[in-house]
Image (cartoon, rainbow, N blue to C red):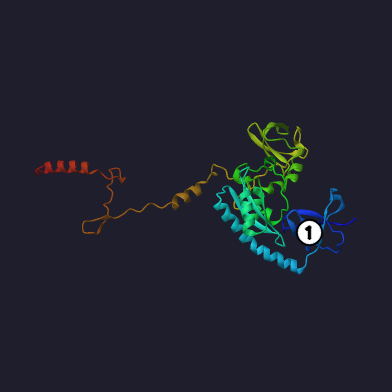
Amino acid sequence: MAPIIALQFHPTGRRYHFDAQGIADLQPGDRVVVKTTRGRQLGIVAGYVPKEKLDGRASKPIERRATPRDLVLQRQWQAKALGALISCRELAEKLGIKGAKFVKAEYSFDGSQVTILYSTEKKRTDLNILGRELRRALRTQVELYQIGPRDFAKVLDGLGTCGEQRCCTRFLTRFSSVSIRMAKLQNISLTPSEITGACGRLRCCLAYENDQYAEAAKGLPKRGKEVVTPYGSGRVIEVRTLAGSIIVDVGGVRHEVQKEDIGKEEFTNPPAEEKKAWPDWLSDEPVSESPPPQSDEEKTKRSRSRRRPRRRPQRTAEGGTAQRPAAKSKPGGTSTGRKRSSRRRSKRGGAQGQQDGSPG
């Protein structure tokens, strides 16, 4: 049985199976010439296909190895592909064709056929007239091939929302099916900007870890379900899939319950008692709210250490400072620091003046 070779026509393109009969010692990276529906193409050997992955269908044979002349000829036609794409866009605008985006032109390695890749949101777009005009302008066989939004983003290339090159351009050879259920299983926000890529479809990376999440989610209840736990019966408010635990609301208090303790009234492995961690600059125990009692000596020292506020000197009209008069002492020998109001002083002064005989 002849070996089956997997070929790629682009570094990240889809792999096709071809029969390598009559050609020996093919290594990954070698170039070969094969015949396809788009004419003769140069394929890149990706590797040998094991017997377990063969589907039983007949594979087309590989014609021959690529020569240096074939490689130079392919580069020449690749250089002319940009001019063919520009001509296609100009003719489409001249014919009034709207709603179709022409993104790439590909020549076969011998220039016998050119393929124009385009994308459109309309279900039916008549491009027969455009095809005829392109055949006259390019003087070769033209095929207009429609691609989907994922392939459209792959051809344009660029950076994804993660800041790196898009996965479809970097290493994805084919697109796998992605569903909204994968995002729900991984507890990812269902906001469109969070789960959609540049192509407007669900991100391909949602399928990368889906199998691991599906395996870890076995035995975990869904959110909102009533379950029995060692803390009592409660409602599930959060599911931590990778941690293998759930958060249960029991009587207004949240508890984390491991997978093996769900549905049981006793713990399989009792959790350790929670200890309060105090900062290094505090003691091992928290500071009490009420201060400790003080002795009489400490109270005396504390009262002496308090400084009395300084009194500001009075300013005179000349700009100098005047000393405050000493406080008058009462008959009992005690002095008061209270100041009499100006109203009381004026009344007292008027009464003394009348007694002395001076005019009031």
Check the image and report above or below for 199 versus 61. Answer: above
Q: Nearer the viewer, residue 117 or 130?
A: 130
Left or right of 342: which side holds 236? right
Closer to the camera, 275 or 81?
81
Q: Quadrant of the N terminus?
A: bottom right
How many numbered callouts? 1
- In which image quadrant can residue 166 be found? bottom right
Please say whether residue 156 is visible from this viewpoint: no
Left or right: 81, with 331 as reference point: right
Using residue 110 as the reference point, say whether residue 137 is left or right of it.
Answer: left
Question: Measuring 18% from the left and 43% from the top, which residue is drawn there?
Answer: 346
Where 264 sits versus 326, above or below? Answer: above
x, y percent for residue 226 = 70, 30
Specify the farthest residue to the bottom: 68
Residue occupied by mark 1: 34
On the rendered image, what quadrant is the C terminus found in?
top left
Kind of residue indicated by mark 1: Val
Relative vertical location of residue 211 with respect to residue 68 in this rendering, above or below: above
Q: Residue at x 63, y 43 (%)?
A: 124
Q: Position of residue 79 (x, y in %)?
A: 65, 64
* Residue 238 percent coordinates (x, y): 67, 38
Which quadrant of the view contains residue 227? top right
